[in-house]
Image (cartoon, rainbow, N blue to C red):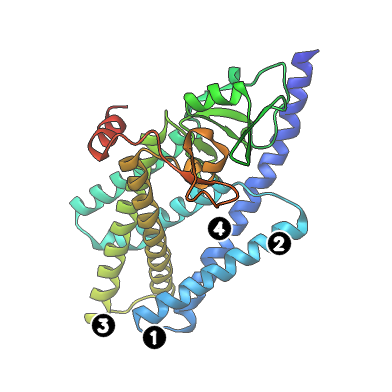
Amino acid sequence: MAGLNDETGRRRKSPELLFRCTISIFSGVLTQLALLFIPLLFPLVSLLPQFLFSALALAIAIVLCQHIKRLLGIRASAPTFVLFNIIFIWAVYLSVISQAVSLSLNFIFNAELGILLFGFLRILSSDPGFDYSAISAEGSILEDGRHLEEVSSTAGGISLHISSEETALSSRRMRYCRICKAYVMGFDHHCAAFGNCIGQKNYGLFMSLLVAFIITEASYVALSYQWVNRNLIMKENISKLQYSLLMSTMNFSLLQVLWQVVFFAWHVYCACFNIRTDEWINWRRYPEFHVIVQTSPDQPSPDMRFRNPYNKGIYCNLKDFLLR
């Protein structure tokens, strides 16, 4: 009977997943078309205004896709959207740029894309450090992962609700993911783009994949710019469609690089100070980050401030991170 239920569940999920993937591909096509129209409509505009127009077109396309999905009451598959854009850029490179660059550059860029695609597919199924045994059979789980059976303790007028189970999990840096409905060791965040949690076991892979995205997209921007610049200087007959494809995908890749560099810098900061994104945002949920400070005798209630008990200094933090 259980096997029959599992089989029925899989059959129900397969059409739903297929539909979500189709919606994501549609969103990817709509996004690339929105970017494609910028160089088609403004072919004589310089690179900087085209880049700014592309950023605006991308934002409008994303908002429009979100509204359509919300109105239809459907969810898309973000990993499918990312995969579509990787393959689309690779197709544009092979059909336009690859014929105009050296054999060595062709090999290097195709190797970068191959490594990127391999890492992306690997992180989809990677184990971030799930621990389903941490969910007690005796108690229910709240949305933030706390058990309903809690003991209330009051410190200086501030009421903290901490269960013994939650304290044990905090000591192991177990955090609850609402999307995966499971505890994750060293939980940083749930990455919608990769369709998986980022935790202790796949944090290094996540950082490596971010670097791979930045390097590959920066390489594509450089090769695209070189192709466009050389053809414009030599005044060769350039196909309008080729020019528009190169400009739109170049601006798309440049926009990706800009936010990914900021995102990567944030995670380098987290590694340096041994803090997770979830812990930094939701530190009030986790008792080990609380410090009660009575600033003055006349103060009616003490302040609760942040303290990172896991910070052992930048050198030790980075050493632990690299040797993990």
Mark 2 packing: few (<14 Cα in 10 Å), some, or many (20+)? few
Residue that badge 3 annotates: 235
- Between marks 4 and 2 in the image, the one whose residue lies nearer the viewer: 2
User: x, y (%) of residue 270?
Assistant: 37, 44
Q: CA distance from mark 4 to mark 2?
A: 14 Å
Q: Are marks 1 and 4 in contact (CB under 8 Å)?
A: no
Q: Is residue 7 left or right of residue 282?
A: right
Q: Is residue 190 visible?
A: no
Query: Considering only vertical position in the picture, is 81 above or below 5?
Result: below
| Front residue of this view, candidates 147 and 89 | 147
Element class at badge 1: loop
Quickly name the residue at label 1: 45
Q: Is residue 318 visible?
A: yes
Comparing labels 4 and 3, the label whose residue is closer to the camera: 4
First in residue order: circle 4 vs circle 2: 4
* Cα gap from disc 1 to disc 2, whole angstroms: 31 Å
Tell me, yes or no, whether the two marked residues, 4 and 2, touch with CB atoms within 8 Å.
no
Q: Earlier in the sequence, mark 2 or mark 3?
A: 2
Q: Residue at x 55, y 64 (%)?
A: 31
Residue 242: quadrant of the picture: bottom left
Residue identified by numbered label 4: 28
Q: Amino acid at mark 3?
A: Lys
> Which numbered tag is attached to residue 68?
2
Q: Which part of the image, by quadrant, shows the C terminus?
A: top left
Q: Mark 2: which secondary structure?
A: helix
